[in-house]
Image (tube, rainbow, N blue to C red):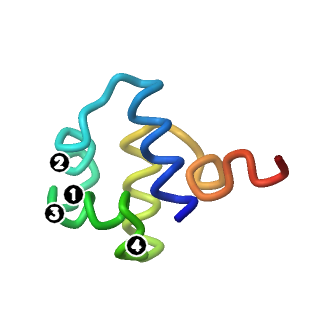
Amino acid sequence: MLIGRNITILLYDKNIKQQDLAREAGVSPQMMSRIIKGDKVPSLPKLVAIAKALDVSLDDLVCKNCGE
């Protein structure tokens, strides 16, 4: 899933641990893992919280490199 791939890239680029992102976004570590693997599609409020925790726009989170 594109969102999971983008989160993975952003975590690497920003040197953030998945567990820390989950805590900052108010999502359980298990849920964050499922989102990143593509097993779970997050709700819009969860996407906003994840984008905020990563300090990126919602567009960057959802559609980073969509045109490539």
In which quarter of the view is residue 54 placed?
top left
Of marks 2 and 4, which one's residue comes earlier in the chain? 2
The answer to which of 29 and 54 lies nearer the viewer is 29
> Closer to the camera: disc 4 or disc 3?
3
| Left or right, 40 with reference to 18 | right
What secondary structure is found at the residue carrying circle 4? loop
| Label 1: how many Cα within 10 Å (few below 14, some 14–19, many 20+) | some
Which x, y percent locates residue 14? 42, 24
Of marks 4 and 3, which one's residue comes earlier in the chain? 3
Of marks 2 and 3, which one's residue comes earlier in the chain? 2
> Closer to the camera: disc 1 or disc 3?
3
Contact? badges 1 and 3 (CB < 8 Å) = no
Q: Is residue 45 above or below residue 37?
A: below
Q: Which mark is residue 12?
A: none
Q: CA distance from mark 1 to mark 3?
A: 12 Å
Q: Which mark is residue 26?
A: 1
What amino acid is found at the position of numbered circle 1 in the picture?
A: Gly
Q: CA distance from mark 4 to mark 3?
A: 13 Å
Which x, y percent locates residue 13? 47, 25
| Left or right, 57 with reference to 42 | right
Q: Which residue is mark 4?
A: 42
Q: Which residue is mark 3?
A: 30
Q: Is residue 35 above or below residue 64?
A: below
What secondary structure is found at the residue carrying circle 3? helix
What amino acid is found at the position of numbered circle 2 in the picture?
A: Arg
| Label 3: how many Cα within 10 Å (few below 14, some 14–19, many 20+) | few
Q: CA distance from mark 2 to mark 3?
A: 11 Å
What secondary structure is found at the residue carrying circle 1? loop
Residue at the image position 36 percent from the left and 75 percent from the top: 40
